[in-house]
């Protein structure tokens, strides 16, 4: 994977190794939990002001992604639900995620939309531009694409390791500009 040099003044690196762009928007940061070694790239918006957002280890939140907790309209107003992402989740550029939960080892393609209260189980791929319907449950080891998203293939058990390696490589490829040549 290609090395990406970043200006350390434009990023925040936490004690647990998270790298968060200062050009991202974290609303309600007290309700956003990054478990470590995750990337939040420029232009991303994480809405922790609506409900808690939990992000596992080695997750990549790409450019201009929106992570927004799902809600349900009730007679007395809106009820927001926690949004959870497992470990080694890659969310592609311009994707919008309003899921109830996303398991580990999941790839969400560029421009995909994961609608309200959807549940994506472990080791799945949502193809670029796919639209996962509200309240959908995506089974493990599946590939979904289209609008509305439908099952178009299955992943092998090796996919888990492939997704892990991609997540590790992506995280390691982001280096401070002064350390890039070392």
Image (cartoon, helix red, strand yellow):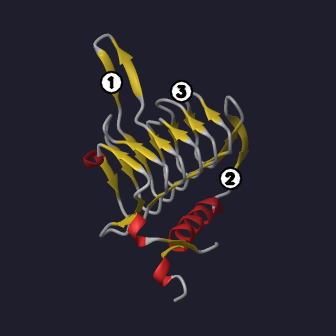
Question: How far apart, in angstroms, are the residues tagged by discs 3 and 1?
Answer: 15 Å
Q: Label 3's element?
A: loop
Residue on which disc 1 sits:
79
Determine the secondary structure under disc 2: loop
Q: Is residue 36 left or right of residue 76?
A: right
Whether residue 5 is situated above or below residue 99 in the rendered picture: below
Q: Which residue is mark 2?
A: 155
Residue for point 72% across, 35% down? 146
Q: Of helix, strand and loop, which one carries label 1?
A: strand
* Outermost residue to the top: 75
Whole-percent x and y of residue 106? Answer: 56, 52
Q: Which residue is mark 3?
A: 134
* Residue 13 occupies quadrant: bottom left
The spot of residue 143 in percent (x, y) is 68, 45
Q: CA distance from mark 2 to mark 3?
A: 23 Å
Disc nearer the start of the sequence (2/3) = 3
Vertical order, 8 against 94 (above or below): below
The answer to which of marks 1 and 2 sits earlier in the sequence is 1
Q: Residues within 10 Å of mark 3 (few under 14, many from 20)?
A: some
Place of residue 16 in the rendered image (x, y in percent of width and height, measured from the top left): 33, 68
- Nearest to the eye among marks 2 and 3: give it: 3
Extreme-left residue of the structure: 30
Q: Residue furthest right?
A: 152
Image height of 18 relative to 112, above or below:
below
Q: Earlier in the sequence, mark 3 or mark 1?
A: 1
Using a 10 Å C-alpha cutoff, classify the residue at mark 2 as few (fewer than 14 neighbours), some (14 to 19) or many (20 or more): some
Q: Nearer the viewer, residue 23 or 129?
A: 23
């Amino acid at each position: 994977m290609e090395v990406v040099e970043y200006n350390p003044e434009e990023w925040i690196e936490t004690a647990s190794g998270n790298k968060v762009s200062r050009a991202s928007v974290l609303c309600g940061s007290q309700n956003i939990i990054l478990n470590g070694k995750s990337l939040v790239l420029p232009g991303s918006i994480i809405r922790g002001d609506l409900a808690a957002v939990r992000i596992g280890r080695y997750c990549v939140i790409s450019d201009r992604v929106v992570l927004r907790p799902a809600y349900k309209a009730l007679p007395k107003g809106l009820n927001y639900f926690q949004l959870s992402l497992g470990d080694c989740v890659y969310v592609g550029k311009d994707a919008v995620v309003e899921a109830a939960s996303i398991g580990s080892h999941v790839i969400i393609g560029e421009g995909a939309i994961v609608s309200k209260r959807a549940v994506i189980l472990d080791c799945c791929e949502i193809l670029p531009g796919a639209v996962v319907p509200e309240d959908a449950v995506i089974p493990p080891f599946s590939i979904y694409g289209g609008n509305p998203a439908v099952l178009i293939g299955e992943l092998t058990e090796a996919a888990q390791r492939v997704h892990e390696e991609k997540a590790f490589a992506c995280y390691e490829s982001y280096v401070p500009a002064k350390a890039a040549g070392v």
